[in-house]
Amino acid sequence: MKEKIAEIKKVAKQKIESITTLQELQDLKVKYLGKKGELTSILKGLGSLSAEERPKIGSMVNQVRDELEKSIESAEKAMKAKALEQRLEKEKIDVTMPSKNIALGSVHPITQVIEDVKEIFLGMGYSIADGPEIERTYYVFDQLNTPIDHPARDLQDTFYVTEDVILRTQTSSVQIRTMENQKPPIKIICPGAVYRSDTVDATHSPLFHQIEGLVVDKNITMTDLKGTLEMFVKNCLGPNTKIRFRPHHFPYTEPSAEADVSCFVCGGKGCRVCKNEGWIELLGCGMVHPKVLENCGIDPNVYSGFAFGFGVERIAMAKFGIDDMRLLFENDVRFLKQF
């Protein structure tokens, strides 16, 4: 029995030294050390030996097992190290070689304008507010003093999901949510996408982006509104930009006005973009209607406020000299890479 064990040890070690792959090493381990391996078979046969021989043979088998396990482990580590070395040599790269050209995109002009406007108003002490694009009519119309029979609620003008849920037509809904949850003073702008059933042309789209502003505090007047908007257009569109205010009607502001800026294409002389008027409508604005303040739990006898809203696309057109809004949505890389 001892001679057999010694022979197993000798043959196994010779094979370990000649093996070149991990799979061959694994097969050898199973052959000698596995559940049905040669050393295991000897241990299972110890019962047939005398009481005197049994511990000696058992000890010898365990010793050989330990030696083979260590030899196999050592060989495995050596093979893995060699394989790693070969792989690193094969995958070695020359770090001095020029890299592949990576095509970089650019910030979309609409995103640029939104970020620029944010910076301007953040510098004026405003904070940024956000809200859902799929909104309840309660926030878009009811709380904004726009009753059920108002033309803005016509099915032809607004995208309805259900009778009481729509795609918001303006970010004024964010203003309502803010006034319901925050006590004055309030000073926010609300950027985001809005939806209206408009015919697509050079200056209109059923999907566009809007930024609205709201200030509510004591002793807020129309003068504060005018000064704010004048500062905004000159910072955003250039110091030579002119702005004018025209009386208008909005159900949620009183008094109300529309503000125009001098045409960015013709400089006020008249062209197809400004419809030969020299001015382009930029935003609507006015003093927050007392009823709207009251709807949101704010005492109109103590507080007043102003609000305004404008389309981001029109700002982009004015800022970058774009004469057709549709270019902003066509995803033509030749156009977008200019920005």
Image (cartoon, rainbow, N blue to C red):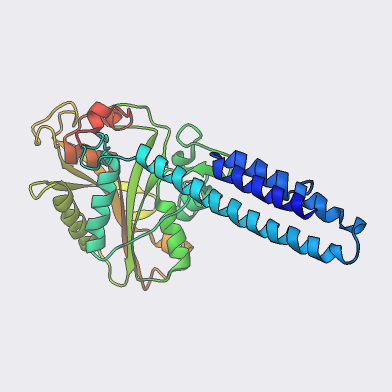
Residue 202: horizontal and vertical position, in percent? 27, 28
Q: Nearer the viewer, residue 2 or 238?
A: 2
Q: Nearer the viewer, residue 320 or 333?
A: 333
How many labels, in total? 0
Residue 55: horizontal and vertical position, in percent? 82, 66
Q: Quadrant of the C terminus?
A: top left
Residue 213 image-quadrant placement: bottom left
Residue 228 image-quadrant placement: bottom left
283 lies above or below 253: above
Viewed as shown, does residue 332 lie left or right of 38? left
Residue 141 seen by the camera:
no
Q: Nearer the viewer, residue 314 or 283?
A: 314
Residue 75: horizontal and vertical position, in percent? 54, 49
55 lies above or below 230: below
Viewed as shown, does residue 102 lie left or right of 238? right
317 lies above or below 120: above
Viewed as shown, does residue 328 lie left or right of 251? left
Residue 25 seen by the camera:
yes
Q: Nearer the viewer, residue 114 or 251?
A: 114
At 24% from the left edge and 37% from the top edge, which residue is drawn? 99
At 35% from the left edge and 32% from the top edge, which residue is drawn? 205
Residue 127: horizontal and vertical position, in percent? 33, 63
At 64% from the left edge and 58% from the top edge, which residue is drawn? 67
At 29% from the left edge and 51% from the top edge, which residue is drawn? 285
